Image (cartoon, helix red, strand yellow):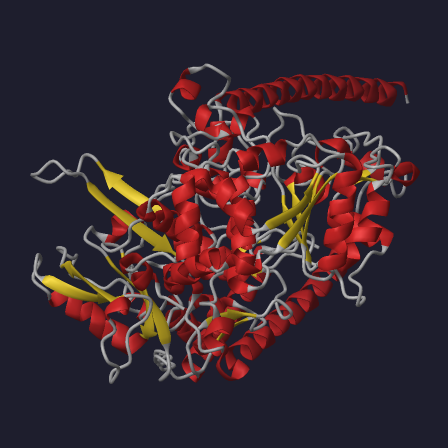
Amino acid sequence: MKTTDEWLDGEIGAQLSEQIEACGIDRRGFIKFAVGITAAMGLPLGMAGRVMAAVEEAALKPPVIWLHFQECTGCTESLLRATHPTLEQLILEMVSLDYSETLLAAAGHQAEAALADSLKQNAGKFILVVEGSVPTKDNGIYCKVAGQTPQQMLARIAPRAAAAIAIGSCASWGGVQSADPNPTGAVGLAEALKIEGITKADGSALPVVSLPGCPASPYNFLQTVLYYLTMQALPELDDKGRPKFAYGRLIHDNCERRPHFDAGRFAEQFGDEGHRQGWCLYKLGCKGPETYANCPAIEFGDVGGNSWPVGVGHPCFGCAEQGVGFHKALHEQADVKKVTPPTFFPGVFAEHGGGATLASAALAGAVLGGATVYGVSAYQRLKKAEAESAESDKEVEKTS
Amino acid sequence: MSINRRGFLKGVAAGALTTLGTGALIEPADARPPKQLPPGAVGILYDATQCIGCKACEVACKAANDLPPELNSPLEQIHGVSGVWDASDDLDSRTMNKIKAYAAQAAADASGTPEVSYVKRACMHCVDPNCISACPVSALTKDPDTGIVGYNPDACIGCRYCQLACPFNIPKFEYDKPFPKIVKCQMCRDRIADGDIPACCAACPTGASLFGPVAELREEAHRRLAAKPGTSLTYPIHRLPEADAKPDPAAQKDAPAPAYTQHIYGETETGGTQYMLLADVPFDKLGLPRLGSESQARISETLQHALYGGMIAPTLLLGGLVYAAYKHTHEDAEEDGQDGDSSTDDPTPGGTPAKTDARRPGGRS
């Protein structure tokens, strides 16, 4: 296997260079892409050689079966528009996309025949990609492809897969369909497999990589596939099945507006001075402090210039986070997951207890004054009563 | 029972005699010897001139000690947010370690730059701690080896004497909890037991918080004070290197020596502390009180031990009081008897008048 340096010095293999040429990419552009994607995967840069080798030697071309359930095809669309040197072509030629309802040239019975063929040929080897949620109510009749519900398709296909990737929030945890009142009982792929009790043919659990986001960042998908090609294993996942290289940190942690948050500079409403100055959008309902994703790091649409929601002045919607996106109102303030000290510093001598305010002093004065008046009048009345009683005593004595 | 002049004077005299007598009986007690630094004492040297105010130590401290954030602070109220920052302005029951800032525009030097310094406040881990002296149940103890002042919540009775005793205002009490504890830095003693260093020192990126044996930290501090301002000085990061270890370039940095205030705060204060500070501004500006080199615990314990030595003085005092009380009540009884005799001579007509009448102003007329 060549090292990164050898790659940078040497020639790219014949097969890949043909492909690259066909795509109109120069060698330098390809190496830049490979090094960048290696870093994004959280691998050491020295691994770039292995990544490039995997890209070149993708002779095994892992077959991919791509299923669409309850969704809008936005994830496929955004993947198609991944424009790091026309990457989708590169990737689609590295993997063998045997079945995809969107991209397949064939249709109808022909497409279903391709699926059946691939299942037979690649049993236990293919990667299952699922886009969209699984309706659990009424046995899933709300979504049917070729007369089959998602449950039936999963029962037929999932046991023969090597691994599964749930792309988008719908496939990860239910997405927009799972918003209250969730009429179809939409759940994500991992949950659906659990409910249906679907495992691999040998009884072990089918590993599911969740890539939430609405749409999921295409590069997170490409990096996951490349990682699998390079390492022959799935990337490290968190407890929600998300790859840590992409979903390991809060949006808040990498946000370019974070210093404003720490310094207490908030946009109070859309279009106000703070909003124009690019201050923190927390008070407008930004869900960055409770959403795990790498949006601020890789942005969207490959055009640069802070082209992601917070970058263009809109609070994060939390689309990638279960229980946040499509569940919390846009303006609702986020629960800050990692509470840290602000950038202000307390003074050396902190004043505590607040001291007396004018109002409290006035109140105390009023109480005191009232008590004095009451005391004086009570004393006078007592004195009077005593004098009267002495008078009456004298009278009693006189009469006796 | 009324006390007449004679009885009162007798009591005073008896009490005074007792006290004098006991005072004469006890030899003037020797002052308690000052406590010495344990041989394996570890500590922290905080160099305010190297602190960049990043608060990584605060965050690491909270994580290492599992402390909840302090929410809805005055600062949050000012900014109209809540649950956003861990924004306490001082040490409290959820904050064992606080970076504070001192800035004085008025004290600007010739170049016009204001005098600015950070200061990290946490338990000083005194060599002779007042809190331990004040604690009636030994809930606070000093580790005989490391010298770390530790806290045992199972022994604590919540009297909060330690709070009053501490000259640095360090121990904090969980007033908001039904079963409150005292909260203070224990120098991450669990981490140290595992061979690790305190979380604040591990997190500090500049070596401003430096962990090491106290004796060596003092040497290091003197080395820094001795450096001519402007000359290059090597600062270890995280912890002092072992004496025979190879210098690790990743664990040290070179920086020009600042014009230090020629004093190590904590070298002598209250008999010395294991958390020591260096700064380039006067320490009282950083909220560190001017304290003598004598531990208040030593003074108060000397006094107490003298008064209670062998329980002689309290025994004599009690004896004297009992005697005075007995004597007094005896005389009282005699006087009461005479009073009784005189009451028979009361010339009130019509036999014994009703008491209520007798009290009336016109009753005896």
Q: Eyeballing the image, is A100 above or below B62?
A: above
Find residue A136 and report its horizontal and vertical position in percent.
Answer: 86, 41
Near-viewer residue (B330 or A337): A337
- Relative to the observer, which residue lies in front, A121 or A306? A121
Q: Nearer the viewer, residue A240 or B142?
A: A240
Work out whether B145 lies above or below A220. below
Q: Is residue A143 left or right of residue A292?
A: right
Residue at the (51%, 33%) spot, across then down: A81
Please provide percent x and percent y for residue B198.
42, 67
- A149 horizontally vs A291: left or right: right
Q: Is residue A385 left or right of residue A167?
A: right
- Residue found farthest to the top: A271
Height in image: B111 above or below B271? above
Position above or below: A329 against B17: above
Between B187 and A234, the residue placed more toward the observer is A234
Q: Quadrant of the N terminus of chain A?
A: bottom left
Apparent side of residue A376 relative to residue B99 in the rendered image (left or right):
right
> x, y (%) of residue A397?
85, 23
Q: Residue at x 14, y 55 (%)?
A: B258
Corner quadrant of residue B289: bottom left
Classify residue B254 by image quadrant: bottom left
Instruction: Write the residue at 52% across / 54% down.
Output: A226
Q: Quadrant of the C terminus of chain A?
A: top right
Q: Residue at x 69, y 20 (%)?
A: A378
